[in-house]
Amino acid sequence: MLPRFDHAWVIALSLVAKGSLVFAGPCDIYSSGGTPCVAAHSTTRALYSSFTGALYQVKRGSDGATTTIAPLSAGGVANAAAQDTFCANTTCLITIIYDQSGRGNHLTQAPPGGFTGPDTSGYDNLASAIGAPVTLNGQKAYGVFISPGTGYRNNAASGTATGDAAEGMYAVLDGTHYNDACCFDYGNAETSNTDTGNGHMEAIYFGTNTAWGTGAGSGPWVMADLENGLFSGLSSGNNAADPSVSYRFLSTIVKGESNQWAIRGGNAASGSLSTYYSGARPSASGYNPMSKEGAIILGIGGDNSHGAQGTFYEGVMTSGYPSDATENSVQANIVAAKYVAGSLTSGTALTVGSSISLRATTSGYTTRYIAHNSSSVITEVVSSSSSTILKEQASWTVRTGLGNSACFSFESVDTPGSYIRHYNFGLLLNASDGTKQFKEDATFCPQSGLNGQGNSIRSWSYPTRYFRHYNNVLYIASNGGVDTFDATASFNDDVSWVITTGFA
């Protein structure tokens, strides 16, 4: 029998092409290292070489039907084409992220807790099924795009660490998608959805929150959410060895055992892992020993704090404290999967610098165009005989997306420097203040029109939401959400726009 280090290393060396991925999956590697997965979640690929079951479930807006998405082959990439067919001409949400470990530790819509979610009965929102397209070895898949208010949870997990028991976890994230709110987490949390005290969590955190610990520079940082503290090292303050990291695909690791824990990370597209901290448990009271409860969260804090944002592609939790060598082999597997960002747009192509106007397609409203009246974004009846002022108000200059260059922003022709942006889900025309928040609020991703005409314009930061006219006022609306302007009636028509050459 090979020792643990050598066995994991041999498994890593055996990584050979099999379809689009590699022979040994991350959980095969963890098992060979003596620290098996007790939860394994991914919407992009199988995490065991033999796994052929459901990766996730989607629900479509047109009729509420659901379907499961499985790998194309054992150990392979998710069948994105099956999702695209099922969700054609409607919207889809990710309702379940299945556990591949066989323990049934599936992630579902997070319930209310210390914080109440924005969806029905205080639940958190579900993620769009198309918000995070990628390819793995050239094959299309979708990640989980977490907007503020979105979260998943399992409060009855089996086999996860409790008390001071040893565990490890990794997640592949989008290192460019984050904010400073609490808390974009993946890992071990309270079973009550409430803050039950220091040391009752152990989860990967990613973002720029500075209320507790910090790392070098201005972030974002990989830290550990241990409840009532984001920790980057031994102290509850700064650890200069925890760097700011913003790789497009980011490998993140947190692991802990009795009086020992570590943070590691690296570029998920190339290279090796670095250790940002490895040592004793935090010196603050309540964290040694730990009091972990064993629930699993994604995108939220242990008390259901849901202000954060981020993107999740895959992650696992293990039984036992994985060796660095085992994690290095997992990193090699992730790199071999060859994550590449996918296209965020489809439909009628837009040309940066061009002037466009956007015409409604809803029956009875097809003479109306998106326009502005001061800061309000509305629809107006516009034609070639309209006044010059109105034509200019209904014309928009296409700009490279302020918050994501793969999408677009729309600058007012008659008010240069002002852009369409969303605020409390209404659309406004505001002057850019240069902040990260404004840039993201003003970034939108066109796709083929949901009713088969023109384009539907999706919010980049809230990809469940689209430009919609409702009582001639513009919102970013979700299909069947809790607000009046989210009504399902005529949704596809109301969010589809014919793009023409600008009136001005």
Image: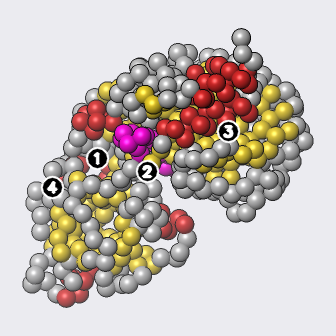
Total marks in image: 4
| Nearest-to-viewer mark from 1 and 4 | 4
Residue 253 is tagged as: 3
Q: Please state which amino acid type lies under the numbered disc 4.
A: Gln
Q: Position of residue 326 (x, y in %)?
A: 68, 29
- Callout 1–callout 3 Cβ contact below 8 Å: no
Disc 1: which residue: 487
Separation of residues labelled 2 and 1 (CA atoms)? 32 Å
Q: Alpha-carbon neighbours of circle 2 within 10 Å: few (<14), some, or many (≥20)?
A: some
Q: Alpha-carbon neighbours of circle 1 within 10 Å: few (<14), some, or many (≥20)?
A: some
- Residue at 60% of width from left, 56% of height from top? 246
- Residue at 88% of width from left, 37% of height from top? 280
Residue 346 is tagged as: none
312 horizontally vs 284: left or right:
left
- Quarter holding the C terminus is bottom left
Disc 4: which residue: 453
Q: Earlier in the sequence, mark 2 or mark 1?
A: 2
